[in-house]
Image: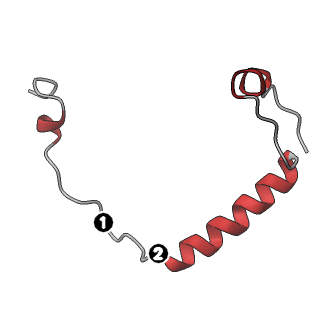
Amino acid sequence: MQETAADIDDTVRVFNWTPKVGIEQGITLFVDWFREYRATVPAMTSMPEFDVSKLVPGLIG
């Protein structure tokens, strides 16, 4: 596995949290969960319509 510069020291210190599984096992568990979850959720065929200009007034013309 490629090394990263990810650093969880602040998370460990601030939240007194430590991971219960390593990154490789965590990724495997997440992918398994996501595949199972995705199989139970109907596919979104299109995005709902919305007016962007109402989202941030004055942003668009």
Q: Which quadrant would the N terminus be assigned to in this image?
A: top right
Dot 1 or dot 2: first in sequence order is 2
Residue corresponding to mark 1: 46
Q: Quadrant of residue 47?
A: bottom left
How dense is the environment of label 1, judged by Cα within 10 Å: few (below 14), some, or many (20 and up)? few
- Say what amino acid the circle numbered 2 marks: Val
Residue 52 percent location from the top left of the image? 17, 40
x%, y% of residue 53?
A: 12, 35
Nearest-to-viewer mark from 1 and 2: 2
Q: Nearer the viewer, residue 13 or 28?
A: 13
The amino acid type, in three-letter code, at marker 1 is: Ser
Q: Nearer the viewer, residue 40 or 4?
A: 40
Can residue 7 be seen? no
Q: Is the image coloured rainbow, by chain, by secondary structure, or in one colour?
A: secondary structure
Q: Using the numbered discs, state the Cα–Cα distance from disc 1 to disc 2 in whole angstroms.
A: 14 Å
Task: Please tell me how many numbered marks the rendered image carries.
Answer: 2
Mark 2 burial class by Cα count in 10 Å: few <14, some 14-19, many 20+: few
Q: Secondary structure at mark 2?
A: loop
Pointer 2 residue: 41
Q: Report the residue at 18% width, 29% height from top.
A: 56
Query: Does 48 sit above or below residue 36?
Result: above
Q: Is residue 55 above or below residue 42?
A: above
Q: Quadrant of the C terminus?
A: top left
Indicate the position of residue 11 as horizontal and vertical percent values: 72, 27
In the displayed structure, does residue 60 sit left or right of residue 41? left
Quarter where residue 14 is shown:
top right
Helix or strand or loop: what does disc 1 sit on?
loop
- Vertical comparison of 44 with 5: above or below: below
